[in-house]
Image (tube, grey):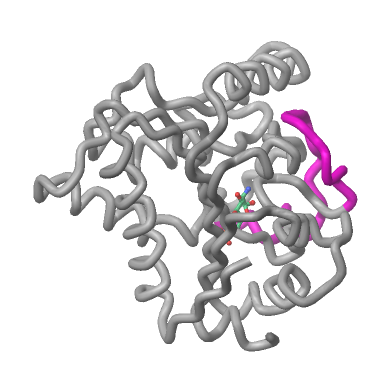
Amino acid sequence: MKILIFPTSEAAAERVAQQILTTVRAKPQARLGLATGGTMPPVYQRLVTAYRTGQVSFAETLSLNLDEYVGLAPDHPCSYHHFMQDTLFAQTDFAPGHTHLPRGDAPDADVESARYDALIAANGPIDLQLLGLGPNGHIGFNEPSSSLASRTRVKTLTSATLAANKRYFAAGEQPPKYAITVGIGTILDAREIVLLATGPSKAKAAAQMIEGPLSAACPASSLQMHQNTTVVLDAAAAAEL
Ligand code: GLP
């Protein structure tokens, strides 16, 4: 693991955006594994700016996102489909047929998980996998106790994750209890991984990921086994290292 610590969350986001841009410029047909969450808009805003100023094109780039809530249709404002359209895809030249997420509204989530895993296998390996970090150490929606060899499947969200993500839902609306997520094994197949974590709520998980034992109790610690992973932190997220 390469660990990079920046004074501010903005500088950390800039570093991650530059890594994505470098990958796409070197290989316009790159397969990107993309991520959602409140950490990512500063990264995606930089990609949008680079596109608008003619510094990059995503017209040939393929994206395969990590996860989606079970039960949310793509047009639900809290779905990850909607998040990606809003923050990145609709503001750049990603081709609609080239942007993939699991379908949260599929009639059978297990069948959808298998379909999505086969899609990744057919298009993989992912050239650059972007990850955020859950306060409990999850990556994608691979919650603590996830198999380190797991593939795409349905996961039950922990009460800690439901509480952490409640802020993205309207008052009175309950976040879904289940999600489809690519597995840890799927993530580790990527050629290159970059994880971004910012803010004090990530400090404990960042320390466990980097300095703790390899353990399903902290799914992000699985990245210790990957040969080409960069962890980008701001000072607040690095505070317990
Ligand atoms: C969410 C997502 C993850 C994300 C993480 C952190 O639940 N499933 O992919 O990286 O939790 O989210 P945030 O950036 O909002 O803190």
Kindly tell me whether residue 84 is visible in this rendering: yes
Query: Residue extending furthest left?
Result: 53
Q: Quadrant of residue 209?
A: bottom right
> Residue 169, percent across and down?
56, 49
Describe residue 29's horizontal placement relative to residue 171 as left or right: left
Describe residue 99's horizontal placement relative to residue 25 as left or right: right
Q: Is residue 89 above or below residue 167?
A: above
> Residue 211, percent across and down?
77, 77
- Determine the residue positioned at 84% across, 54% down: 144
Q: Quadrant of ligand 1?
A: bottom right
Q: Is residue 8 above or below residue 118?
A: below
Q: Quadrant of the N terminus?
A: bottom right
- Determine the residue positioned at 72% across, 72% down: 210
> Residue 43, percent across and down?
37, 58
Q: Give the total number of marks visible in the rendering.
A: 0
> Residue 33, percent across and down?
51, 39
- Determine the residue positioned at 33% across, 67% down: 14
Residue 156 lies in the magenta-colored region: yes
- Determine the residue positioned at 62% across, 21% down: 121
Kindly tell me whether residue 170 is visible in this rendering: no
Q: Quadrant of the C terminus?
A: bottom right
Q: Quadrant of residue 71?
A: top right
Describe residue 9's horizontal placement relative to residue 35 as left or right: left
Closer to the camera, 192 or 162? 192
Closer to the camera, 32 or 102? 32
Describe residue 98's horizontal placement relative to residue 168 as left or right: left
Residue 217 lies in the magenta-colored region: no
Query: In this picture, which residue range is highlighted in magenta?
Result: 145-167
